[in-house]
Image (cartoon, rainbow, N blue to C red):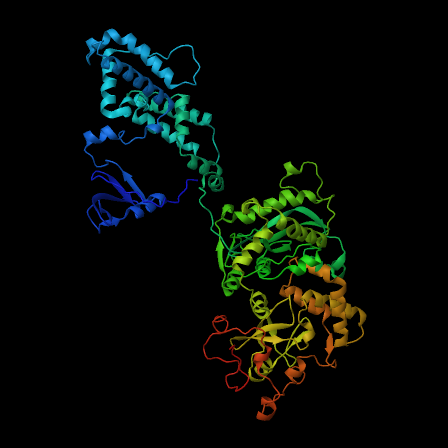
Amino acid sequence: MIAAKPSPVQPRFSFSEYDGIRIGGQPYRYFETRENGHMFVKVNGEGVPQIMTNAEISRYLIAGNFECIPNEYQPDHLRERILPDGELLSLKDTKAHKKAAMRLAVVRAARELLDDESKNVSRTATSIRPHLMTIKYRAGEILDESEPDKESETLPVPKKLGAKTVLEWERKERRFGLAGLYDRSAERGNRDRRMTADELMIMGAVVSKYLNIQRPSQASIFNEVKIAFAEENDRRRAAGEPEIICPSRETVRQAIRKLNPFDVTLSRKGREAANRQFAPVGIGLDITRPMQRVEFDEWEVDAITLMAEGGLFHHLTDEEKKALGLDKKKARWWITVAICCATRCIVGMVISRQPNSQSALRVIEMMMRDKGVWGDACGALTPWNQFGWPSVIVTDCASYNISSLVQARVSDLGISLQYCAAANPQAKGTIERVFGTFATQLMPRLSGRTFSNIVERGDYDSVRRAVLNPEEFCSVLVRYIVDVYHRTPHSGLNGETPLDCWNRLVEKFGVQPPPDLGRRRLIFGYERERTVTRQGITILGIRYHSEVLARYMTRSLERKVAIRWYPEDIGAIWAELNGRWFEIPAVFDRYQGVSAQEWLDAAAEIRAQNARNAEVNFAVVRQALNYIKETNSAAMTRVGLIMEDWSERRMEYEEDRLFIGFKTSETEAQAPYDGVRGQWGTRLPSACYAPSEADGEEDLPSAEAFVSGNFGPNQFFDLQPNNGTDAADDGRDWTLEDE
């Protein structure tokens, strides 16, 4: 690199009125020099004159924003003596340089004779002609001296040389310098086809058929050209017109070669192949901080895993396995992966039998969660702590990614969602490269690998060699990502590992904290519709109740309400009451932090042990939850990476299977939250009951106490419109607006 630090002593520049000046790409002319600098005016005479000091000109020269072209505006007869007719001699080819060097040697040899007074040679052909042999021999010596490294026993003497030619070269060198000895003999000759307009038109019409997705060969195009010319000549003979000449095979081949290469690839191989071959590559994305740009995509894993029963799967029924896609003995999986483009760290991963909108939302949610629980469950030695609130998410235009569900939820998070064009994988090349790394680095280590095609697979029996079950497959993926991929030097990071890059950039920029649990419940929760009863809202045997819901029931005829149910934590739900959303907690706080799958397993355990009891004490529920968490926590966490089916159909099935006739006794000692709630959820007002000043104001807390997220109207303006509609229009103390 050229040193750009200027010396302490600034130069003093000088300019001529004929110099061409470029300042920032704009053309100027030199006007005059003053004490404080040089004045330049625009060529068109418009604008304000530009005054620049020598120091400023020096800095502009270093930055490449100042250009001086000497004598650009000289008269033509003078400019030709200085400029080589607008061309750079250094760009000439080797043959032209050798010819000019030979002519310069002849000129120098001739001038030696002209300067020798004893020879009495003048600049006339008659005077030069007797000394041509001497000039040729001396020119050979000069050429040999100019190439000392060339080993040759003979001198490179010009073969043919005339007196008038010597004088012409000497005159041009004297007038134009070295540029006068270069000629344009290489451009001589008529290179146009010697074909008539009719012939060119007929041949062009047939040659254009080469641009076809059927990919016709050049030989077939030439045969069609011959047929077309034969038919035209038949017509001409019948009309008494002169015949035309069919072009040769080489002429047709040259016409095909002159077709636009991009058009050829586009029409014969498709847009994807044309973009891959001709798409220009610029500077690329300028990404500096973690989570600034996140890309996610889906990939069908090149491995077959066993759907063997083991670990958590002995808790699942046949219907549950079918709902999860685990009913087959052996199958392939899809993984949806999200990567931080700045650090190349994997910030989210979900495994599913078929990608869908819920798997996309699950990956977006994982981007904003600490994934250490999955790393610990899989035995990873490196923390999986890469998370944050992304600024831009880029994915493809798959139907599940462009669904209104995904777009609305991402918009609620304030994240920009960008879609790359179809058949344009380089628009999200970071995640595409990761899948290539998985295929080449991880898949060869797994039994049951399917390979990318049958040719590559050969005789390898993928099905018979499948040995991994889903839990083991999840562990393998997590361990590879956390302990191998994140710790391997990455060429895209100049040899730095993704983990070190993440730590360095987080130390420098930090990451935006993710949304709290209440907001996650509302945004990532499943949409359902439930009926409000005296017991509140019941989902999978768990009752949710609060003061707000109780007052809504007593003052509204509508019993069907929209809810958001979050299977990752069933401790609370969100319900829409008269146009506003409120968080309704579970009656028992023991469900805080419990996932839906843990609760289903605990309920199955309870029903198996208490089949004859219609009502189960909550102490039994608590013990079952603790048992499930202690005995299967690692297995459940690993399988938590698998996208579960929580459709309305499955929830109806689970409620019919486990929770018909299943009740939880409320004789258990009150939980810490129960004392705050008072009697809401355990004793409801009757139809004739009206809350009074005495029993309402003192015993019942405000509903704000049950909202886990303190969201202002600006954050949920679309969910809580400021239209003056309250949860109960005539209530005094039961309305809840998020402050």
Q: Is residue 199 left or right of residue 425?
A: left
Q: Find the residue positioned furthest to the front.
A: 9
Total number of numbered discs in the rendering: 0
Q: Residue at x 26, y 23 (%)?
A: 180
Q: Position of residue 376 (x, y in %)?
A: 69, 58
Quadrant position of residue 147: top left
Q: Position of residue 636 (x, y in %)?
A: 71, 61
Q: Of 19 and 682, which appears nearest the observer? A: 19
Q: Position of residue 450 (x, y in %)?
A: 67, 43
Above or below residue 68? Residue 383 is below
Above or below residue 644? Residue 455 is above
Q: Find the residue positioned furthest to the top.
A: 130
Q: Position of residue 209 (x, y in %)?
A: 42, 32
Image quadrant containing the N terminus: top left
Q: Is residue 611 left or right of residue 221?
A: right
- Let me know if residue 79 appears in the view: yes
Quadrant position of residue 574: bottom right
- Let me know if residue 400 appears in the view: no
Above or below residue 171? Residue 727 is below
